[in-house]
Amino acid sequence: MASVSLAPAATLRVDFAATRALSVSLVAPLSDADASAQSMPDASPVKWHLAHTTWFLETFVLAEMPGYRVFDDRFGYLFNSYYESVGARHSRVARGLITRPSLEDVLAYRYHVDGALDRHWHALGAEHLALITLGVNHEQQHQELLLTDILDLFAANPIEPAMFPPTRLESVAVGNGWTRHDGGIVRVGHDGDGFAFDCEGPAHEVLVRPFALADRLVTNADWAAFIADDGYRKAALWLSDGWAWVNREAIAAPLRWQHGNDGWTSFTLSGRRSVDPAAPVTHISFYEADAFASWAGARLPTEAEWEVAAQAHDAGSGNQLDRAGPVAPTGTASLFGDCWQWTASAFLPYPGFRPVGGAVGEYNGKFMNGQMVLKGASCATPRGSSRASVRNFFYPAQRWQFTGLRLAREL
Amino acid sequence: MASVSLAPAATLRVDFAATRALSVSLVAPLSDADASAQSMPDASPVKWHLAHTTWFLETFVLAEMPGYRVFDDRFGYLFNSYYESVGARHSRVARGLITRPSLEDVLAYRYHVDGALDRHWHALGAEHLALITLGVNHEQQHQELLLTDILDLFAANPIEPAMFPPTRLESVAVGNGWTRHDGGIVRVGHDGDGFAFDCEGPAHEVLVRPFALADRLVTNADWAAFIADDGYRKAALWLSDGWAWVNREAIAAPLRWQHGNDGWTSFTLSGRRSVDPAAPVTHISFYEADAFASWAGARLPTEAEWEVAAQAHDAGSGNQLDRAGPVAPTGTASLFGDCWQWTASAFLPYPGFRPVGGAVGEYNGKFMNGQMVLKGASCATPRGSSRASVRNFFYPAQRWQFTGLRLAREL
Amino acid sequence: MASVSLAPAATLRVDFAATRALSVSLVAPLSDADASAQSMPDASPVKWHLAHTTWFLETFVLAEMPGYRVFDDRFGYLFNSYYESVGARHSRVARGLITRPSLEDVLAYRYHVDGALDRHWHALGAEHLALITLGVNHEQQHQELLLTDILDLFAANPIEPAMFPPTRLESVAVGNGWTRHDGGIVRVGHDGDGFAFDCEGPAHEVLVRPFALADRLVTNADWAAFIADDGYRKAALWLSDGWAWVNREAIAAPLRWQHGNDGWTSFTLSGRRSVDPAAPVTHISFYEADAFASWAGARLPTEAEWEVAAQAHDAGSGNQLDRAGPVAPTGTASLFGDCWQWTASAFLPYPGFRPVGGAVGEYNGKFMNGQMVLKGASCATPRGSSRASVRNFFYPAQRWQFTGLRLAREL
Amino acid sequence: MASVSLAPAATLRVDFAATRALSVSLVAPLSDADASAQSMPDASPVKWHLAHTTWFLETFVLAEMPGYRVFDDRFGYLFNSYYESVGARHSRVARGLITRPSLEDVLAYRYHVDGALDRHWHALGAEHLALITLGVNHEQQHQELLLTDILDLFAANPIEPAMFPPTRLESVAVGNGWTRHDGGIVRVGHDGDGFAFDCEGPAHEVLVRPFALADRLVTNADWAAFIADDGYRKAALWLSDGWAWVNREAIAAPLRWQHGNDGWTSFTLSGRRSVDPAAPVTHISFYEADAFASWAGARLPTEAEWEVAAQAHDAGSGNQLDRAGPVAPTGTASLFGDCWQWTASAFLPYPGFRPVGGAVGEYNGKFMNGQMVLKGASCATPRGSSRASVRNFFYPAQRWQFTGLRLAREL
């Protein structure tokens, strides 16, 4: 995997252990039933995330180790996701019917694999370490999905369970400024040390025109103004597919917003709570982000514009995994740690992109169609996995992730 | 509820306690996750069955008792099934997303309601006792559904869990005779002492022509011959809607049959097992039953024919609830205790039928459209709930119940 | 075809010629495009009706005549309807894409077949004459469908074309009485001279309880009262499947009724017109008929009740084919000629029913599932094809035919 | 409409007349029924194309002329396509049910509008002339759709009508070379004299890396090799969404290809004909184009790469409207006139793109989501409407247009 620069093995071993442990600690508040249910085809059961990330390590690393014995022959079929070349797999839409193996069984699977990897650690070659690095980052992605998927499940339950206790969040005042960029030929994509997913490269030059990027994210107060101005009812603001979606699905607010006597509430990992006007809006689709930008007389930034603006910032500082939802931005940027930010760019290969060979190579390239790029990192993104070059991607109608937006405009 | 003749209250108290206990004992092999999942819209989670039958008692009996305090205000919304007049209810197709309350919570709900009923027992009037009698019979119906629904769930799991250990079943030789009936004006429907559902009455006279009824049920060996003769591929044998169903769903055998090197196997509550040629075929739709009868040069019996033939038999003796699946018939009749038997009759009201007033009256009358009557009782029907007048009913394509057939012909 | 008593051949030749000519005259107001379009899967293009009835004669009669040359080899595939045993056929839902052969081509096909039959008439045997008799009656059924299907097509066109000029209809006062019947063993089904479809027999005895049948049909004024009393919004009146249908399809009035400043209008073959309060309501589903009867404190008659009451009447007198829609009943009965009347009976085989052998035998038996019987005849039923024993049948949600109801009650 | 450079009014008058006449001449072989049917939701009836393009002129130009009288008030509802701001419109999927107005009525509509425009021509201002220019180009687009839509309709007819007589096409030998381009900052988008659609601008600079573009289009022979090598069965070649599409729709060849004893045939506007190995492949989806490129070890060109390569060529010379299908390329380029060529670029706004204000502004911007850009022009594109800057766009699964591909690769 030529595009991956390895962390030294010692650091990797710590990262590996910490990531594996974090997954387990995340599910502590959950029952066997909570961990087994699937709220919709886009989401997966918590138990599946725990097992799939383990299967990845077992299949791509451990299976080659001498003397390793597969934990359970049937798990390959159950916990493969989309790797066509590794064999048949269980139907995605029926993952919620797998009540056995139980959560306890899956945790035993994890300890089995973790222990085996630990025992073989000294024998791992560079390629294995690269795969484990990939596995750690892959698991971090699933940690975020685990949180958004359990949130979606609990939101579908009329009794509205809370996963975490409510935390007191302090909103911080933030400016309304725009940061200008002169454009020109800029370099984007991953190019340095450290891990990156294959789709983040090759680094390459792009010609960017002068632009301005908003210093802050669009807030819930902004969004309430959009709603109050009938933004969801003005066809001229919407893309054609978006307008059809709004009408077909009767969309009138971000996902899980409800309006009551005390104003807007939203369902969060801490249960139903009042919407904080100063916090960034989340759980909106690309269609909504695009319509809002039109309404605001602005546009979404392109991926390159966002990335160039972010290259000067420290991605690591904004991590928010221990919070139940987005909070008001604590700086002028909020590039990382509040929400994923929709861009105007389709998720397509960078010039010169070549998928990695073999089964692992099915990783990102096969999704380069029909989806839009999101940049940044959300409150559910694990600490340490944020980079300016990260390319997250979803279909334009999806909004069960912590998705928001930042405006841009021409100069 | 004029059509219900009460059992004496003392007997009822024993029946009530036994029925309530049986439900709990049935779920002993199941985990919280097993009890929470829903395999398809027709089925419900085990936990839902446990709670819904409890809600029925709480809502229609306990709610009127002085000083009774509802266990949880939110359960009415969650565990109402189709009683429109009792209020809003949770979407049927999303029952599998209710991971909380847990199985443990639901069991606590049961003990709360059982205890409260016990404390109020001395104060219950005739109408309350009638409702409890209805509740007991209602719960017995759900005990059967609980078993068929968990079977459907486990069948959808590639690792094919078994709920019960395999039991050794002894097949018994059975004749191929036909019992003749001279026809004439006969009396059908419930008319005596003891409980019956509203749709079983009024008892009334019907003019029946001479007919013959097969002494035995159609067996798996019979069905294998039908398959071997391309029965599923001969359009002339099928009703038009049935033929469309066979082709659309690619139906080629009873539900969950698979053909391997060792012949046919079927998935049962004891896991996947060889199909016993001498046992009655089950898990077939009305369409299949009708096509088989055409292939055999016979027809399905009407409801009245079946009931007249069964009136002389003791319905109680055939109960099989402790078995994991149907076994070979142990007598010439097999009217009760092996499988529900499709008839040629649509589920329509008997002459003079009037639904009971009030919410309970929504019970059966509103389903009198588009479904076919099944007579008898299956291996999953609780002991003591069988009667010749029972009218079970399902849509013609449904087959996740223990459904089979018995042939009839003209004289 | 044992159940068919033949009309003498001479009469048949006149009936044949008249029926064939009537079909052609019906389409005189229609363009090639009108005749080619299909408004929904339940309906067929006018051109298809013209060709299919011709294909029936060509395939089952002419094909056996020495020296007969098939008009066009490709028409068998295009104009077969559901006769599985005659070979492959064109998809029903795509009939509206067959813009060629043109209406003119199809008329040429008709003349070719009519001429050939005329030339072979002297050589036709009894079986051929029986098939032609069937063909005449089959074509009469399609004449009715032709009218209801073109009505459905024009109703889907925002400019609302009229097929016929408006006619002045005179409403006639009618009583509100009930005719009592003492019940007992009665004989129903076709048993005498003259043609009948296979499903009308065998004639057989049925035990009927005393009942009363309304002297008149339910009128538009009655229906407006049902609507005004929120009949479409009271769940307790509806069958479960019906209630789901009402909500899913947002049903709030008979098909094509609209409410404006001047009250209710309906779209007819003479365009949009005011609803006549005294005329029978039409274009209602079985679900609506059943809910109305519940609302009125009555019920639908069974098929046997209706037929017994009708046996004394002259079916031929009520024919209304030259009218654009139902009119107020002109007698106490209105059994025939206004609208088809939903009954409480499912369309199931009569005792001893055996489908005719061969391809023609696919005729009615294969539809004996999931549909309800309608009795009588509508304003679009050709003169001379009405009988008390006729069993029309449709699915409970269908209502593009001229369907109405008459009430019954217990005595 | 700032981005449109006008042709002088005199030339416009000639272009207008020629374009309007061409539409009418195209439908000469069609009947009223042919012109009224709609084969699928993506397609429209021929009659609708004729009327919609006329409605465009009437609504945006004539409606403002003093004394102009709208031809028929109801046509606005029937023949509006997607202009939300102009008012309600008829459901797209039901266009095939509009059998009236007839083809003759629609032709009368055309003559009415053409005559009125001619009478008002001297009074037209610059803005009106710009709108007529847009109308001419808009009609040219619909001329192409008219041909592809009638082809789709005839292909759905089992008797496979031919619109045009077969023509003898001569295949021409063509090289297998690649033309190299050094990359750098290039200028793309419409920027000169003459008409262009809004989405073709603003012209802007793009940084392009060195690349090579195939001298020829991919041929039917190439495609047959892809099929023979199981290209449709190798998951690794396909995008994830594409692989799901191939399996769901059972795709195994280009649209309308059939394999028989004499090899591959395809259905064309001249009926079913043998596939010419030397001709460009057409009627393939983006998914297929992308998979083929992977199989060939190459990739699709980006929009900018294609456009830069095409800027030196004369777009006008390749027009093929009078041919019934694509022929072998007659030069090294085949950039225009054979088929639309899928690119690797999503259809997104160019930097600085602003939709035109008002209803006309709904034109292209609202479709900038989820679709891929195609460059060039097909055999059905009207002569004179081709430009290197044209951006055609379709969803990745659509293939009823004349769509093919040309390979590119890195240097």
Image (tube, coloured by chain):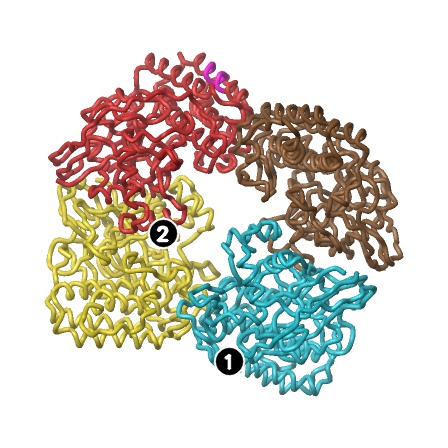
Chain colours: A yellow, B cyan, C brown, D red
Instruction: Work out which quarter of the rendered image holds the C terminus of chain A and state it.
Output: top left
Label 2, on which residue?
A285
- The 10 Å Cα crowd at callout 2, few under 14, some 14 to 19, many 20 or more, is many
Please tell me whether mark 1 sits on a helix, a strand or a loop: loop
Residue A221 percent across, percent down from the top left: 36, 55
Judging from the image, mark 2 belongs to the subunit labelled A
Quarter of the rendering containing residue B6: bottom right
The residue that appears at 42% across and 41% down in the rendered structure is: A235
Q: Is residue B189 left or right of residue A234?
A: right
Tell me, for residue C189, which label it has, or none: none
Q: CA distance from mark 1 to mark 2?
A: 54 Å
Magenta-drawn segment: D110-116
Instruction: Work out which quarter of the rendered image holds the N terminus of chain A and state it.
Output: bottom left
Q: Is residue C246 visible?
A: no
Q: Are marks 1 and 2 on the same chain?
A: no
Residue D204 percent across, percent down from the top left: 20, 33
**Dots 1 and 2: beta carbons under 8 Å?**
no
Residue A282 percent across, percent down from the top left: 34, 57
Label 1, on which residue?
B167
Q: Is residue B324 visible?
A: yes
Please tell me whether mark 2 sits on a helix, a strand or a loop: loop
- Callout 1, which amino acid? Thr
Quarter of the rendering containing residue D355: top left
Residue A200 percent across, percent down from the top left: 19, 53
Magenta span has D12? no
The residue that appears at 62% across and 23% down in the rendered structure is: C108
Q: Which residue is most to the front?
A: C66
> Which is the main secondary structure of the residues drawn in magenta?
helix
Q: Is residue D98 left or right of residue D381?
A: right
Q: Is residue A141 left or right of residue B83?
A: left
The residue that appears at 61% across and 73% down in the rendered structure is: B338
